Amino acid sequence: MEGNTILSIRNVRVVFEDGFTALGGVSLDIGENEFVTLLGPSGCGKTTLLRCIGGFEKPTSGEILYKGENIIPLPPYKRNINTVFQRYALFPHLNVAQNVSFGPDLRHEDKKATAKRVSEMLELVGLAGFDKRRIASLSGGQQQRVAIARALINSPDVLLLDEPLGALDLKLRREMQLELKRIQRESGITFIFVTHDQEEALTMSDRVAVMRSGEILQLGTPVDIYNEPQSAFVADFIGASNILPSTMVRDRLVHFLNVDFPCVDAGFGENAPVDVVLRPEDVKLKPETDPVDAPLGVVESLLFKGVHYEMKVRCGQDVLLVHSTHAREVGMHVKITVAPEDIQVMHKSDFSPDVRKREGSVQ
Ligand SMILES: Nc1ncnc2c1ncn2[C@@H]1O[C@H](COP(=O)(O)OP(=O)(O)O)[C@@H](O)[C@H]1O
Ligand SMILES: [Mg+2]
């Protein structure tokens, strides 16, 4: 994280009345002007964490510091934090401008100054001139923008967004992702964004916190999370396709596909069970006749995907997904190579593919 910390979430636990632990001691520092995304499957505690930050849920224990001050005793309206909810909750009987000016009007702020701010906010969210429009006459994307303008007019330091794009179709969703990113940059407000969509998280965020079962499993930049997942769950959730149970022979040597591969990782011990992630684009197929010492596989399927070919290559028990601009025909025998720096070694966890297979539980 660069810059000053604006929010510091420290060991926040939420245990509901029925005894269910929704957050098991979450810690996270968020910087000024940062775009942080909470990413994880449904039910992992994203909304609960956001509600704690917004003041709608009181943690069972832990602290939430805003510029160094514990804000847990403060009600939502006394926090300089606004929320855009999953359902936009606009007022259908008010027009666009009246929806946006709702907060300032409630506080009886100067009408003229508010009108000016409304125009500025509508401009910022790309709805200049929509002031008098009825909410029902707007598309989903436009309603979303009104909800954002309505939150931004209060000049919060932090904006919480709970799956705000979930109701939009894919094309609109992509557009709004870029729009939100632009609004965040131009407004200089810290965004804490919630989604279960990995692509959305990787596209928009400065940093991503990957959550599972009330915990943050990994926190990092999109590039870190994508290139260096630290567990099979994170690798799987952000869309990695080749996760192989493996053995770390010793530092910088890992065994999978029945072969020892040189790698760059160390510190896992000797003959230690690990998981390995291989990106489909990092697996390079060579002709069977190539002199390189590498495991043999057979091409089981070949699909043209536009930019690249997608192949499935069987090697013993394992089937690898391979992306390449070079097609290999089905039935062809190939040698499977991976550069040492393209092998990502991870500690074993309860989500490891072989562990899940044994338990017979597939998530
Ligand atoms: N008031 C509540 N009482 C008991 N369990 C709850 C309550 N609110 C949420 N939960 C449970 O807490 C877990 C996390 O919920 P939530 O934070 O909404 O997840 P997410 O937003 O990641 O989908 C879920 O299993 C949910 O059923
Ligand atoms: Mg939720």
Image: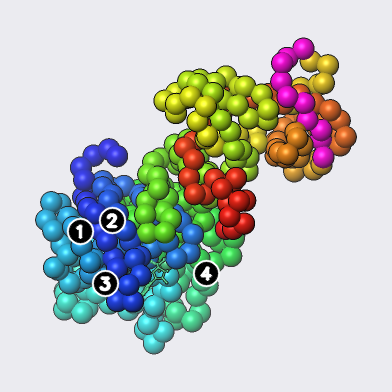
- Residue 25: mark: 2
Q: Amino acid at mark 2?
A: Gly
**Distance in Å between CA atoms under marks 4 and 3:** 23 Å
Q: Residue at x 18, y 57 (%)?
A: 63
Left or right relative to 322: residue 352: left
**Residues marked 2 and 3 touching at CB (< 8 Å):** no
Q: Earlier in the sequence, mark 4 or mark 3?
A: 3
Classify mark 1: helix, strand or loop. strand
Tell me which amino acid carries mark 3.
Phe
Give me the C-alpha separation between circle 2 and circle 1.
7 Å
The stretch drawn in magenta includes residue 296:
yes
Residue beneath disc 3? 56
Label ID, residue 167 = 4
Amino acid type at circle 1 is Gly
Q: Residue furthest top?
A: 291
Separation of marks 1 and 4 at Cα, in angstroms: 33 Å
Magenta-drawn segment: 291-300
Quarter the C terminus occupies: bottom right
Other-residue count near label 3 (Cα within 10 Å), few / some / many at <14 / 14–19 / ≥20:
some
Label 1 sits on residue: 62
- Find the distance from the CA under tag 4 to the CA under tag 2: 31 Å
